[in-house]
């Protein structure tokens, strides 16, 4: 009976959408406040892109349930997939992964499920809605602390999250990002510089637990709380300067793994399979990198390691995505540097200072965070990179990007570089 209820909802939604003549619009710079994600597919609004790609007669229909953190990236992928598959109509339902898993197990008509963690994918597998072994990891993400630009909580370090009177918002523990946030606090509490009291003290400062990551980010962007924990990809969607960030180091962070699968009862199994393959392939992976996600590599994605471009973003006026072809057209220099082996080598690449100048670094930026495809990160002072003509972005024998910074220890040289974030 639940399945027929969902079918009726979809039919009603389609009729309303046709009557309204909805059209797509550009993404907004910050998410709107929300108390809970929509349980049904949301129609297009003037301030956000339509969640349904333009239909065409021969393309077919596809319903994709995807984690809220994938909203902007999957909308872009949906547009491309539709164009590449005869104008197929792709309808998205974005919400917390736990909510989506519940909806699917209760009979919601999903053709594809993309979760922000493996736990909720396992829920659908145990319920018989996804066949075990068909799920595949398609992207990764990591955590960051966000706070309003005017910094009412006077935050300067992670320890400050335990300051008395601070107002913190987190996602519910059942939502992947909420669980990862608790993992961060638990890891920190095991270190002497934070002490065992860190996690319980921080949790006393939590004033609300939100139903998805977009709701957490919205409250911070609107100044309704002093701090929150979201994915780096969500923080990067705020372009109006209303938030600032605190980096969570690798030893305390969690590299979130996102699985995707076609559902067992997909109404259009062939189109569902094509969508999964598209997300895993070079075209889908490039879109995900553009939106700040960390791509997977090797056979897990179906994409060649060289397919991942370099996304340059953060506090810049002109975010860019540098492909290998575009990189090879830029003027390059040769430098000498010593890697871990202790042997001096000659490297050829584009000065990082040149790329930063092209992107247009905004006032107030102080550092650059380099992120590799495996989630490894390194931070370097912005002033050092701007002054060092020998700090370059180079490529290895497979065409993958890496940074070479002779004045820094090799541990700051990130191989398989996919993201350069100015903070």
Image (spheres, rainbow, N blue to C red):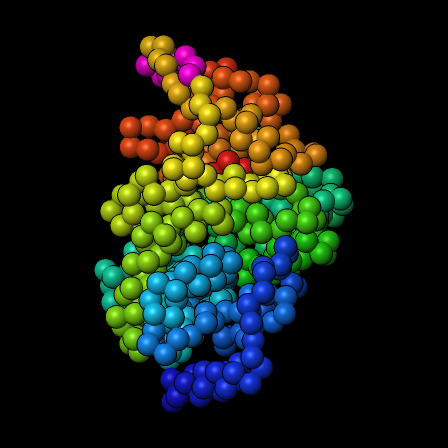
In x, y percent, where is residue 253? 48, 41
- Frontmost residue, 57 versus 145: 57
Query: Which residue sits at x=66%, y=64%?
Result: 33
In x, y percent, where is residue 409? 46, 18
- Indicate whether residue 152 is drawn in magenta: no
Q: Indicate whether 220 appears above or below 8.
A: above
Please give left or right for residue 75 compared with residue 132 in the image.
right
The image quarter containing residue 224 is bottom right
First to last magenta residue range: 334-341
Please give left or right for residue 315 compared with residue 255 in the image.
right
* Main secondary-structure element of the magenta-colored stretch: strand
Task: Answer yes or no: is residue 192 visible.
Answer: no
Task: Answer yes or no: is residue 8 visible.
Answer: yes
Query: Which residue sits at x=70%, y=34%?
Result: 363
Q: Indicate whether 353 appears above or below 59.
A: above
In x, y percent, where is residue 216? 61, 57
């Amino acid at each position: 009976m639940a399945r027929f209820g969902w079918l009726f909802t979809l039919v009603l939604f389609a009729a309303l959408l046709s009557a309204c003549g909805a059209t797509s619009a550009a993404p907004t710079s910050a998410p709107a406040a929300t108390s809970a994600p929509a349980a049904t597919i949301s129609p297009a609004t003037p301030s956000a892109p339509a969640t349904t790609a333009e239909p065409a007669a021969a393309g077919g229909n596809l319903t994709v349930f995807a984690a809220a953190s994938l909203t902007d990236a999957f909308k872009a992928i949906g547009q491309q997939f539709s164009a590449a598959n005869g104008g197929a109509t792709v309808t998205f339902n974005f919400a917390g992964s736990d909510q989506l898993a519940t909806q699917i197990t209760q009979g919601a008509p999903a053709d594809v499920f993309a979760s922000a963690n493996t736990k909720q994918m396992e829920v659908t597998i145990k319920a018989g809605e996804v066949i075990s072994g068909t799920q595949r990891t398609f992207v990764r993400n990591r955590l960051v602390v966000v706070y309003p630009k005017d910094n009412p909580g006077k935050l300067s370090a992670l320890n400050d999250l335990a300051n008395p009177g601070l107002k913190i918002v987190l996602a519910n523990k059942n939502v992947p990002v909420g669980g990862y946030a608790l993992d961060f606090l638990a890891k920190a509490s095991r270190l002497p510089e934070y002490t065992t009291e860190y996690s319980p003290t921080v949790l006393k400062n939590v004033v609300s637990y939100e139903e998805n990551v977009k709701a957490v980010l919205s409250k911070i962007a609107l100044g309704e709380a002093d701090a929150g924990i979201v994915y780096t990809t969500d923080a990067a969607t705020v372009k109006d300067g209303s938030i600032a960030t605190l980096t969570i180091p690798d030893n305390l962070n969690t590299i979130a793994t996102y699985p995707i699968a076609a559902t067992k009862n997909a109404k259009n199994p062939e189109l569902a399979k094509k969508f999964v393959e598209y997300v895993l392939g070079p075209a889908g992976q490039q879109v995900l990198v553009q939106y700040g996600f960390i791509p997977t590599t090797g056979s897990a994605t179906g994409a060649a390691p060289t397919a991942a471009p370099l996304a340059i973003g953060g506090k810049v006026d002109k975010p860019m995505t540098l492909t290998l072809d575009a990189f090879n057209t830029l003027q390059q220099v040769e430098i000498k540097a010593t890697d871990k082996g202790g042997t001096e080598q000659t490297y050829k690449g584009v000065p990082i200072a040149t790329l930063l100048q092209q992107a247009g670094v905004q006032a107030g930026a102080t550092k650059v965070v380099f992120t590799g495809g495996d989630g490894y990160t390194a931070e370097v002072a912005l002033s050092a990179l701007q002054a060092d003509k020998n700090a370059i972005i180079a490529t290895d024998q497979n065409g993958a990007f890496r940074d070479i910074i002779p004045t820094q220890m090799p541990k700051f040289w990130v191989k398989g570089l996919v993201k350069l974030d100015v903070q």
